[in-house]
Image (tube, grey):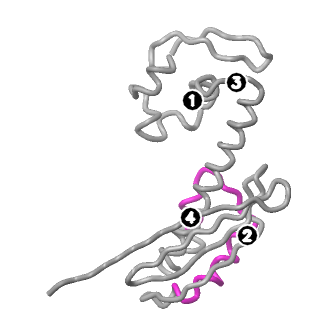
Amino acid sequence: MVLIYARNKHVGAEYLAKGQVRVRAAVEDTLFSGWVEIDFALDTLAVLAARGEVRRGIVSACLGGPELLSRIVGLRVAQGMTRTVDGLVGGANGCTTMANLVMECCHAVVSIRRRDERRRLAGAGVTREDHLRSLLRPGSRLRNSCVAFAEASPLLERLGLAAGERQIVAAEDGGADLQQE
C-alpha cells in the first residue's frame, strides 16, 4: 500500500493604506485546503479584519472556520497570542489548521514590522548590529526566547551580549551606560 501526501503552504503580504498591511496564508494539502487573510495596523499590530475560506477539510469544525475568524478582530499580536488564537479559533471546538494559518499571518506581520523598523533605522545611520543589541539588551523579552537568542549563543557572543560580559548599552537619554551581566 502506497500512501501519498502532499502539502503546499504560502504566506504573502501587501501594504494597504498608510500603516496597514494585509497578510494572506494559504495551505493546500491532501486533507485540507483553505486560506486566511488578515488586515493589520502596523503601529499597534491590531487585527482590523479577518477573512478566510475552507475548500476541503476532514474535521467538521474546519468547515465553519471562516466564522471562527471573526473572533480575532480587535486582538493585538502580543505575548500569549498562540494560546489566545488556539482558544478562539483552534482547540476542541475549532479548527487547528485555521488557527495555524492565523499564527502564520501573525508571524509574518511581526517580520514586516521589524523589517520596516530596520530600514528606518538604517536610514538614520544605525547599524544592524547596534539594532540587534538594542533588541537583545539584558531584560528584553527576546532574550532567551529561542536558540538564536540564548545566553551562550554565537549571536549574543558576537554582539558582546553574552552573560558575564561588560557591555555598552545605549541609554534612553541618548548617552551610554556600562552594564555587567
Give the spatial CA distance, label 1 vs label 4. 27 Å
Badge 2 or badge 4: first in the primary sequence: 4
Q: Horizontal placement of 150 versus 66: left or right?
A: left
- Looking at the rendered structure, the secondary structure element under dot 2 is loop
Tag 4 and tag 3, C-beta contact below 8 Å: no
Q: Which mark is residue 136?
A: 1
Q: Which residue is mark 2?
A: 73
Q: Which amino acid does the dot numbered 1 rest on? A: Leu
Badge 1 or badge 2: first in the primary sequence: 2
Q: Which mark is residue 66?
A: none
Give the spatial CA distance, label 3 vs label 2. 35 Å
Tag 2 and tag 4, C-beta contact below 8 Å: no
* Stretch of the chain drawn in magenta: 62-85
Q: Which mark is residue 126?
A: 3
Q: Nearer the viewer, mark 1 or mark 3?
A: 3
Q: Nearer the viewer, mark 2 or mark 4?
A: 4
Q: Which amino acid does the dot numbered 4 rest on? A: Val
- Looking at the rendered structure, the secondary structure element under dot 4 is strand
Q: Classify residue 123 by image quadrant.
A: top right
Q: Which amino acid does the dot numbered 2 rest on? A: Val
What residue is drawn where x is 70% and y is 24%? 126
Tag 1 and tag 2, C-beta contact below 8 Å: no
What residue is drawn where x is 78% and y is 16%? 174
- Residue 178, percent from left and from top: 62, 8
Q: Horizontal placement of 96 versus 132: left or right?
A: left
Q: Report if residue 114 lies within the magenta region.
A: no
Q: Which residue is mark 4?
A: 11
- Residue 164, percent from left and from top: 45, 14
